[in-house]
Amino acid sequence: MGSRAAGHLEPVPAAATPGRATFLELFFDLVFVFALTRISARAFEDLTEEPGREHGWGTITGSGKTLLLLLALWAVWQGTAWTTSRYDPYRVPLQTVVITALVCSMLMGVAIPRAFSETALMFAVAYVIAQVTRPVILSIALGPHPYRRLKVRMAVIFAVTGVLWISGAMLSTNVQVLLWAAALAIEYLAARCGWPVPGLGRSTISKWEIAGEHLAERYQQFFLVALGETILVAGFAYSKVPYEMGHAWAFALALATSIMLWRIYVQRAGRILGEAVMKARHPANIGRSAADTHLLMVIGLAATAIGYELIIDHPLERIPAPWLAMVLGGPALFLAGRARLEYEVFGRVSPSRWIAVTVLVASSVPLLYLPGVIATAVGALVLAGIAVADARRAHGAPPEAAAPPF
């Protein structure tokens, strides 16, 4: 790739043995524990704030806006994780990128509850700064390295979408949602297409160099962040209600559900994702696919956490369809993502995943006429069945090796 001046940033060779996540990266993740709790709190308010709203159009639009905020948070986290998996995270430019993203993510989390009213500009400016400064800092640090051209293209695209973010924050809510959704769509599409910019070209994702095991570990850690958020939500919800039998059962089932979610993730694809990335012919391709997979699972965990709070607050009441969608839809989304992860690691999908999703969907109609805590129990039992099936399949057999289809 030619000679480069001393001190310039260099990509981590794809075959290099990566280090573990740095303390700064783990510190960065802690911000997202807070931010995800704000996502759950906002969704909970959308489902319960106004009498009768849980049955109407407001619930759908409110959920869509909350999802938009979650996708923005994920974009900042993922961009930072890919950066620290491609370059030495101990270098000053990389640490500057992570600290900037940390501060901006915290401000975004603070702004989430009123992100479509009073704090819209705070959220938008924090997001734009996090996304624009990363490629700008890297383009300077890379010097004459060929990857510098990629960072310039990324900076151009984020600067263009930044106009949509900031202008949307200063307009009416409906226009704001449209502009923010358009900005996110452009960014996600640009990332899938190699950040194309007229006159500057585009990249081929399969040729990107990443420290695959490091990136896989970062996805595992974010999954744990999202799983930890479900525990926090359950604990906060139970601590503010009377310690009566219905609430206690709802809390116990919430904890059991989180334990099953953890068990299903790590047995076994989630545990050896790094091995699968390193075995793949093009690690960046499986890394990109794993990003989408973990996003789906994180959305499922966020919905599950919202379901915890709703049922712990109202354990013995019949619940409306939007509430049930959180209680059962969250685990179903998680299982769909987990099935995709299994394919990425082993090149196959166990039938139990789709059977479980089918059971969750089929049980939703009768559960509309039963107390909410029963719906939580059904979700926990279905997940427990998956965990038992996984354990029985693995019992007495040698550990299955990764066989990625990429």
Image (cartoon, rainbow, N blue to C red):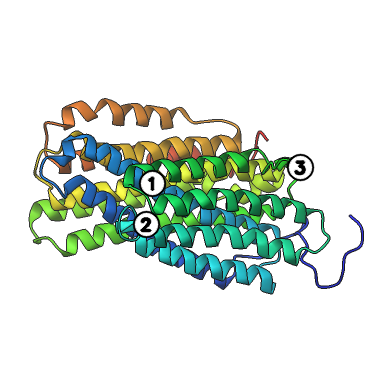
Percent coordinates x, y for residue 85 in the rendering: 66, 58
Position of the C terminus, as image quadrant, is top right
Which image quarter: residue 97? bottom right
- Rendering coords of residue 49 (x, y %): 16, 50
Q: Give the residue pinned by disc 1.
A: 176
- Residue 25 seen: no
The answer to the question of whether label 3 and label 2 lie on touching residues, with beta carbons closer than 8 A, is no
Residue 236 at x, y = what percent? Answer: 23, 63
**Kind of residue indicated by mark 2:** Ala
Question: In front: 189, or 272?
Answer: 189
Task: Give the residue pinned by disc 2.
Answer: 120
Q: Which mark is residue 199?
A: 3
| Looking at the image, residue 35 lies above or below residue 402 | below
At x 48%, y 56%, the residue is: 222
> Which of the two labelled residues, at mark 2 and mark 1, occupies the earlier sequence position?
2
Q: Residues within 10 Å of mark 3 (few under 14, many from 20)?
A: few
Q: Whole-Å distance between the Cαs marked 2 and 1?
A: 9 Å
Distance (Cα) linking label 3 and label 2: 34 Å
What SS does tag 3 mark? loop
Q: Are marks 2 and 1 in contact (CB under 8 Å)?
A: yes
Task: Classify 10 Å Cα crowding around label 2: few (below 14), some (14-19), many (20 and above).
Answer: many
- Mark 1 falls on what kind of element? helix
Mark 3 belongs to which amino acid?
A: Gly
- Quadrant housing residue 228: bottom left
User: Which SS class for mark 2?
Assistant: helix
